[in-house]
């Protein structure tokens, strides 16, 4: 692999983060003497022409938007080993996802930040672009020369121009932030898809929780008691599954949020509303965080579902049907690296996503690790009520998978308890939920190699409906090399 100490005239300083398609570096532009962010397509993707094209089209669309509310692209190029990269302005104050690390924000600040993100989306819409992947990690914060913070939308990897979008058939976006029409082939996407995602961002900033599947969203006031009912309605209107009932434009949503932010006093914890000062000028420091405790519906509650879906949704183009029918009952599937293999019952193996996952979505150290999702309908995987049958399996070399799996909850399902699992190859803990909406069942497992030999930990999520429990058969079939 080409060692990256320098990319063209840009001197790499440190890694800022890794997403589904590549890594973002903080670098220094020696000619202009300025910091920049360089996004490099991951090596395992760079041989895929469709992914390359998509990666570069992100850069071109960002340029096309040419708005101070959207991250600016300065340069585009290719490494000697062929990996494409693009150079963008550096957001020195992190992302909304970073702000959420410390829990929900003061309400007025949450509303103002969401309003600014909505105004950024409006700028894109006016340029004929639907973002299609608005989520906290794609909303960047940059300190302006006068000390205020700007909000910048980034990452149009999944964006298409409005004209193209009407014919799109790929499910794209990120679970929790994705409107239902984005998971429906041929539904046609318009700017209201982004209104839904913006509603999800606002909901998360105010409650600390990623919203559940469309139409099954826990009322925000249950997660943040004392939240103004009007604010809750404003957020839920953006999150309407039927886009006809949503705010008609990102701008209309922004205006309502701005209005609410000036009148809201955060009653959830007896705070005096002093957070408004923190958000002055847009996105100020979150200096007046409410003491909202995360109960069983807290952020961790939805993380495992999101984790599995990240592999499904994060890399929307990676659908690779490499199913191999085999002699024993069921279908054997493998991921793109060939490291993970497992067998699923017949009928579950209609669609395979083999492109890996980011263990960060389970609260583990970030990275791009082998992972696969196989199901009868991956497009509806994120909807617990959809009665999907399938398996997600992802490796993690770092962190404590068992601890993370133990922290997971699935609001809306009945928790049946946990048990130890011991097989020839794996041992670990299996946790089960039944009576999920749509009569679904859900199993989560954290596995480590059964023998003394070291090996990666595996996170497994199994979705099933009726019939005999397939969990142990699937876990027994799992091989990792
Ligand atoms: P996904 O691949 O699902 O979009 P992601 O948004 O986290 O996930 P990337 O877009 O690859 O992945 O970005 C990785 C991280 O790099 C981001 O979470 C953010 O913290 C950081 N980042 C991205 N662009 C910039 C930028 N221009 N300035 C500063 N930090 C950035
Ligand atoms: Mg991103």
Image (cartoon, grey):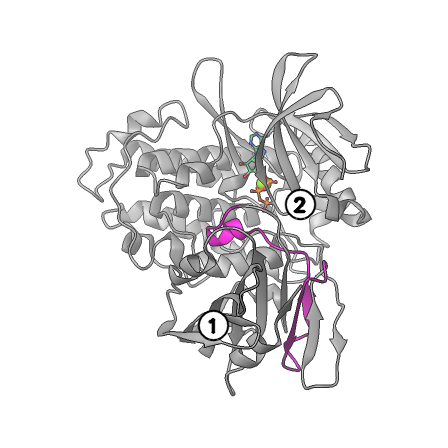
Where is 319 relative to 152, above or below? below
Question: Is residue 437 part of the magenta span, yes or no?
Answer: no
Mark 1 C-beta to ligand 1 under 8 Å = no
Q: Is residue 180 visible?
A: no
For disc 2, the neighbor class at 10 Å (few under 14, some 14 to 19, many from 20) is many
Mark 2 C-beta to ligand 1 under 8 Å = yes
Question: Closest to the observer: 107 or 297?
Answer: 297
Tell which quarter ligand 2 is in: top right
Question: Closest to the observer: 112 or 324?
Answer: 324
Badge number at residue 21: 2
| Residue depicted at x 41% and y 26% | 282
Q: Residue furthest front?
A: 452
Q: Secondary structure at mark 2?
A: loop
Question: Is residue 351 part of the magenta span, yes or no?
Answer: yes
On the image, the x and y values in percent for residue 471 come to 52, 78
Q: Quadrant of the N terminus?
A: top right
Question: Closest to the observer: 459 or 150?
Answer: 459
Q: Is residue 299 visible?
A: yes
């Amino acid at each position: 692999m080409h060692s990256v100490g320098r990319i063209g005239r840009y001197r790499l300083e440190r890694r800022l983060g890794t997403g589904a398609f590549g890594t973002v570096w903080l670098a220094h532009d020696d000619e202009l003497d300025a910091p920049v962010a360089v996004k490099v397509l991951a090596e395992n993707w760079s041989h895929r022409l469709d992914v390359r094209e998509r990666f570069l089209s992100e850069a071109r669309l960002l340029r096309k938007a040419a708005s101070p509310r959207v991250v600016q692209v300065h340069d585009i190029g290719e490494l000697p080993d062929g990996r494409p990269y693009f150079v963008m302005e550096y957001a020195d104050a992190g992302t909304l996802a970073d702000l959420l690390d410390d829990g929900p924000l003061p309400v007025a600040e949450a509303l103002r930040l969401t309003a600014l993100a909505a105004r950024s989306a409006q700028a894109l819409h006016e340029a004929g672009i639907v973002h299609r992947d608005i989520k906290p990690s794609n909303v960047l914060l940059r300190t302006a020369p006068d000390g205020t913070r700007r909000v910048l939308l980034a990452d149009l990897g999944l964006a298409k121009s409005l004209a193209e979008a009407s014919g799109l058939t790929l499910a794209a976006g990120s679970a929790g932030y994705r409107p239902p029409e984005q998971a429906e082939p041929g539904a046609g996407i318009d700017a209201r898809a982004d209104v839904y995602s913006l509603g999800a961002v606002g909901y998360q900033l105010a409650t600390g929780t990623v919203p559940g599947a469309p139409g099954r969203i826990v009322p925000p006031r249950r997660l943040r008691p004392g939240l103004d009912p009007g604010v809750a309605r404003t957020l839920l209107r953006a999150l309407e599954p039927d886009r006809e009932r949503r705010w008609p434009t990102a701008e209309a949503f922004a205006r309502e949020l701005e209005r609410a932010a000036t009148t809201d006093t955060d009653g959830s914890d007896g705070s005096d509303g002093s957070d408004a000062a923190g958000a002055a000028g847009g996105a100020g420091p979150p200096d007046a965080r409410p003491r909202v405790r995360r109960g069983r519906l807290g952020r961790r509650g939805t993380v495992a579902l999101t984790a599995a879906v990240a592999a499904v949704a994060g890399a929307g183009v990676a659908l690779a049907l490499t199913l191999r029918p085999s002699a024993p009952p069921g279908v054997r599937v493998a991921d793109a690296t060939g490291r993970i293999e497992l067998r699923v019952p017949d009928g579950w193996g209609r669609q395979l996503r083999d492109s890996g996952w980011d263990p960060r979505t389970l609260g583990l150290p970030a990275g791009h690790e082998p992972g696969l999702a196989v199901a009868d309908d991956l497009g509806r995987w994120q909807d617990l009520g959809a009665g999907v049958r399938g398996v997600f399996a992802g490796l993690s070399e770092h962190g404590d998978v068992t601890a993370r799996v133990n922290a997971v909850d699935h609001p809306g399902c009945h928790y049946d308890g946990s048990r130890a699992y011991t097989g020839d190859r794996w041992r670990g803990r299996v946790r089960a939920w039944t009576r999920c909406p749509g009569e679904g069942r859900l199993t989560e497992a954290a596995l480590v190699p059964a023998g003394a030999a070291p090996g990666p930990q595996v996170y497994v999520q199994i979705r099933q409906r009726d019939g005999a429990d397939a969990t142990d058969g699937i876990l027994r079939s799992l091989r990792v090399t």
